[in-house]
Every structure is written in C-alpha cells, then in structure tokens.
Image (tube, coloured by chain):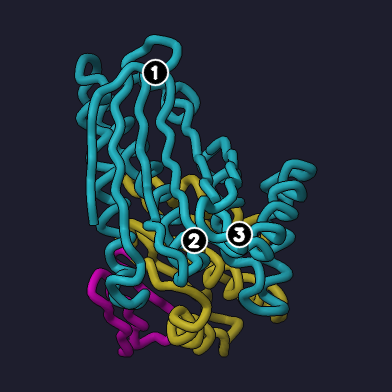
Chain colours: A yellow, B cyan
Amino acid sequence: MKNINGESFEIRLEDDNATVVFKGALRLSGTEDYAPILDMLKTTMVDSDTPIVLDLRELNFLNSSGITMLSRFVIEARDRTGIKVQILASEAVPWHARSLKNLQRLMPSLSICLS
Amino acid sequence: MTTSQSPVSSPEGHECEYLTLAFSPSSAPLRSRWRNNGLSADFLGDYVTTFLPTEGDVGLLASRQKEIKHAVSYLANELLENAMKYHQRDVSIPIRIHLELTSHDITVSVSNGISVSQAQIYQAFVAHLSDGNAEELLLKQQEENAMHGEAHVSALGLLTMISDYDAQLNWRFEAHPAHRESMIVTTFAVLALNAVTGASA
C-alpha cells in the first residue's frame, strides 16, 4: 500500500496495485503539485486484464487543476491498448455529476459507477 | 484581510446581500496563502445558504442547498486561484473577492492587478471564448494540455465554470489609477438560481 497525504486529503494505492482511493478536498496549485499523484495513478497501468478503479466517493472537492490531472490520466489510459478504467462516484458529492462526464467524453470506454 | 458585508438595494430596487473579502498578496507567500483560497471559498459557499429558502420538502431543500453551496465554493476557489497566480505583485492593490446575492442569482467576482501585456493575452482569450462552445473548448484544451503541459490551466478553470456549472462569465478591464503599465481585471461569474437547482433566495 502506498499513500499520499495532505492537510485536507488522503490518497491510497491499494495492495492490488489497481485501486486508488481518494478522500477529502484536493486543491493543489498546478501540474507540478499534482505530479506525484499522477505518477501514482500511472503505476496502475501495467496489466490490461485488471481494471483500474479510481474510488472518488469520498473526494468532496477537486479543483480544475485536479480535474486536469485526472484528464491527463484517462487520456493516457485511453491511448494504451486494453487498459480499462472504472470510476466509483457518489450522488451525494455535487462535483461528480457535474464534471466526471467530461472524463467519459475523453475516454468513451470509461465506466462511471454512481451510487 | 479585510471584510465588509451589508444588505443594499440594487439599481432595480431589489434588495441584495453582499460580502467582500480583500487580500494583500504581499503579506504572505503564495504557497502559504494558497490554503486560504479553499477556506475563503468554502466560507462563501456556507454564507449563501443562510439566504436560501427554508420552506418546502426538507430533502429537496437540503439537496438544493448542497448544490448551491458547492457551486459557489467551486467558482470562488477557481477565481481566487487564478487571481493569486496572475496578480501583479509590484502594484499596491489588494485582490478582492465579492459575493452578491439577489432573489434571482448569485454573483462571485474577483479583481486583481495585471500587467498590460498579460491583460491583452487575457482579452484575446475572452474573445476566443465568446466565439466558441465552452464544452468543446474544454475537451480540446484537455487534449492539448495532456500533450504539451500546463499552458492553459487557468483557461481550463474558467471553461469548467461555464461547462459544468452553467456560470455566465463577464469581465471588466480598467486602467490602474496610478500605474500606467498595469490594469485591474475583474472576472464575474453569475449563477442563475433557477438554472442551478430551481431554488430562489
């Protein structure tokens, strides 16, 4: 398991190396600050048989720089053959219904599970 | 930081509520000030909920409040982040964020100092935005950004405000009263309350 923690957020890569769990509010200031998180996400892109799961259900806030970081990840996943990505989202978190649809437009095979 | 708040009458005679926060960027480094963007944005989001309707279906009201609170917080945070990044530090004017609430809409506006050359780049972006579809521009810029890096990140913030939050954006560019090489730019984001959730203040 690997973690990246900040004052208002916690990100955890599970032992399966395919599930990343986000919690809290992410408001980092730009590409450079988001780079370690993007690097962590990219480590999941090794096995096309195992879908990558981004669990965002407890990520209550993400700024546009964070949305850009997720966009970069799904664009890279889309451009690699056979990589599957699933996002776990929540109806109780307002930004999910508003912004995640754009990720699906960037990567049409992206699965979003809204619960 | 300074604050002011007051109920006033708008030019149309409708009462409105407003709140202004002002920051002097030179009083703390950008990195240590950054966390205050989120604190201020969340405060503004919380603040507006006081003025939203309290009668009706409890579950529906709670859901509307949550949506509006989040939308205000998102818009305020993005506008503050942009202002903090692009504010011209050698001119002695504060960054101001202003929240105004009427029965029809909520306006969040942020003003900051900017060099004349930076203002011209920004004005060109504004013109480009008015010619295109924000949703398409957002996707196009996400693709470009994935290839080339951070060049358009602040534009992406503005585009998400239009595309994902149905915010109406407007801008005002003014000459700086004391510095010929500087301007003051104010970015306005307006949320129509009935368009957001069917709620009204």
Please report the bounds of the magenta region as a residue range. Answer: A1-25
Report the residue at 44% width, 86% height from top.
A36
Nearest the eye: A56 or A48: A56
Residue lying farthest to the front in this orientation: B178
Of badges 1 and 2, the one in the foreground is 1
Image coords of residue B135 (percent x, y): 67, 47
Distance from Cα at disc 3 to Cα at disc 2: 22 Å
In the image, A13: left or right of B12? left
Q: Secondary structure at mark 2?
A: helix
Report the residue at 30% width, 42% height from top.
B20
| Mark carried by residue B10 | 1
How many neighbours does mark 1 have within 10 angstroms: few (below 14), some (14-19), or many (20 or more)?
few
Q: Earlier in the sequence, mark 1 or mark 2?
A: 1
How many neighbours does mark 2 have within 10 angstroms: few (below 14), some (14-19), or many (20 or more)?
some
Report the residue at 33% width, 60% height from top.
B37
Q: What chain is tagged by disc 3?
A: B
Q: Secondary structure at mark 3?
A: loop
A4 in magenta: yes
Q: Earlier in the sequence, mark 3 or mark 2?
A: 2
The reply to whether label 1 and label 3 mark residues of one chain is yes
Report the residue at 65% width, 67% height from top.
B152
Of badges 1 and 3, the one in the foreground is 3
B7 in magenta: no
Kindly identify which residue carries mark 3. B180
| Mark carried by residue B82 | 2
Q: Secondary structure at mark 1?
A: loop
In the image, what residue type sits under mark 1? Ser
Image coords of residue B78 (percent x, y): 45, 56
Nearest the eye: B75 or B61: B75
